[in-house]
Image (cartoon, rainbow, N blue to C red):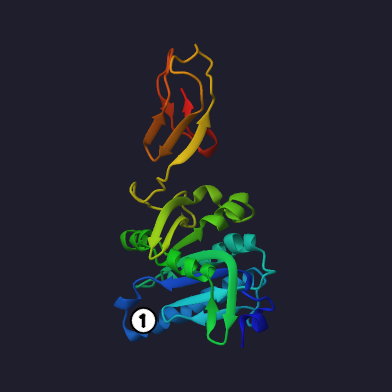
Amino acid sequence: MSSAEVNGVAGGIHRFVVFGDICGSGTLGMAEKELHRAAMYAAFDEAYGSVGVEPGTFHQEDRGDGILTALRPDVPPRLMVGRWIDTLYESLRAHNTGRSPRLRLRIGMNAGLVAQDAHGLVGRAVDLAARLCDSAPAKRIMAESQEVDLLVVVSDWLYGNVVAEGGRYVEPTHYRPARVRSKETDETAWFHVPRRTAPPLTGTEREREPRTGVGPSRGDGPTPRTGGGNRTYHIGGDVVDVHGNTFHGDFTGIRKGTAAGVGEPE
């Protein structure tokens, strides 16, 4: 059966993709693995039920110590980055109370064109969701922060178009960006630990790709001696690289601010 026959559109349709993985499953015995798998499926089912996604209405694949899911196109993505995450977190917290070892999950989220055939799901949206979940920063966070039971990693597209818009249970200011590099993937991803203002990313993992802004051709002070033209500021992390500029007057530095105010002279 072709993807056109399954999805109704050649090349796939736009779907929300979730890839979940149990942390540290390789260290568990068989009985613990079975318990964790059952609890993971129960938590996912509760989370999907909280956003009105009923069993049998979405595609789900078992990945041993994880789950791959593609939802119907009509499922509102804001519910998935809001109530769904919140419910999953509460379900894990309830299950883990008084238990050792605890069930701890990494979740990769993305949206895009997904095709489906008799063997399962295929598409770049699926590949990226899996790589976000299995990314080096995600694994390091969970390995070094044993108190964290749930880490959510969303794609840059999903953050910019859905998470950043906010909404009930959505915490856009509690996400932090970092680069994800795996195989041919080189993407900005956004990391989130529910109930925390920021995930424990290191300085080397935080997004440090240059942001380019074009300054005015003439400032408020005297005419620059070097002539006119635009000024370009490259800002990445704590380093500011300024080209083709001469500063006059009482200039004290560059203030590091939010995206709306990056590179404002003090």
Q: Secondary structure at mark 1?
A: helix
**Measured from the top left, where is residue 86 in percent x and y?**
55, 62
**Closer-to-camera residue (159/235):** 235
**Measured from the top left, where is residue 210 in percent x and y?**
43, 42
Amino acid found under the numbered disc labelled 1:
Glu
Q: Residue at x 37, y 58 (%)?
A: 137
Q: Residue at x 48, y 70 (%)?
A: 127
Position of the N terminus, as image quadrant, is: bottom right
In the rendered image, the vertical position of residue 259 relative to residue 174, given as above or below: above
Number of numbered labels in the structure image? 1
Q: Residue at x 35, y 61 (%)?
A: 136
Q: Is residue 219 left or right of residue 4?
A: left
Q: Residue at x 58, y 72 (%)?
A: 114
**Measured from the top left, where is residue 41 in percent x and y?**
51, 78
Residue designated by label 1? 32
In the rendered image, the vertical position of residue 255 relative to residue 79, given as above or below: above
Which residue of the protein is positioned furthest toward the left in this rendering?
27
In the rendered image, the vertical position of residue 221 relative to residue 203, given as above or below: above
**Measured from the top left, where is residue 205 in percent x and y?**
36, 51
**Closer-to-camera residue (188/241):** 241
**Closer-to-camera residue (6/165):** 6
Label 1 crowd (10 A; few <14 / some 14-19 / many >=20): some
**Closer-to-camera residue (232/62):** 232
Q: Quadrant of residue 131?
A: bottom left
